Image (spheres, rainbow, N blue to C red):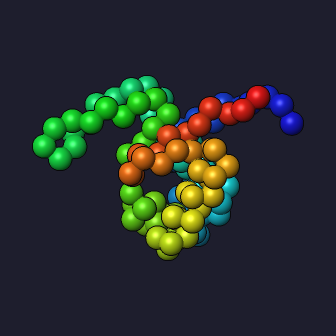
Amino acid sequence: MDGWISLYRQIKESWIWKDKEPFDKRSAWIDLLLTVNYKNKKIPYENGFIEIEKGQTLTSIKQLAEKWKWSRHKVSDFLDRLEQDTMIVQVLSLIHISEPTR
């Protein structure tokens, strides 16, 4: 299947997104896509600032586990699997969405 679709970040405000059920793998992946920056941004971090680039987000296993209602182990395994498939790159807690291969 070729092509792409626009997915507005507003979907996260929808009743369907706010369901109390744990995320499945597809929902977790879409959540990562919706969470990453669409442009470079400096954010306060510890005693200074950190530059979060387009396609990156700053998070933690703990934060994702709480959001997705998963165990930390399940989140870690999922992120490792995405990284093995070159869908993301993990740098500490920085997640970078890889460019799709064509």
Q: Nearer the viewer, residue 39 or 48?
A: 48
Percent x, y of residue 39: 43, 25
Task: Compare residues 46 and 23 and report the one nearer the observer.
Answer: 46
> Number of numbered discs present?
0
* Left-right relation of 91 to 82: left
Residue 30's spot in the image, x, y percent?
A: 61, 48
Residue in the picture at 43% in, 66% down: 66
Q: Position of residue 97 (x, y in %)?
A: 55, 39
- Residue 10 in sight here: no
Front residue (pair 33, 14): 33
Please tell me which residue is depicted at 22% across the width and 43% down the height of the picture.
45
Compared across the picture, whether 86 is left or right of 20 comes to right
Picture residue at 34% right of the left edge, 29% below the top: 41
Image quadrant in which the N terminus is located: top right
On screen, 46 above or below 51? below
Outermost top residue: 39
Residue at 62 percent across and 32 percent down: it is 99
Q: In the rendering, at what x and y percent does residue 5 appear?
A: 71, 32
Residue occupying the far front of the picture: 84
Q: Is residue 48 above or below residue 29?
A: above
Quarter of the C terminus within the rendering: top right
Residue 79 in sight: yes
Q: Residue furthest left?
A: 47
- Vertical side of 97 occupied by 12: above or below: below
Query: In the picture, residue 77 is in which quadrant?
Result: bottom right
Q: Between residues 3 and 16, which one lies in front from this camera angle?
A: 3
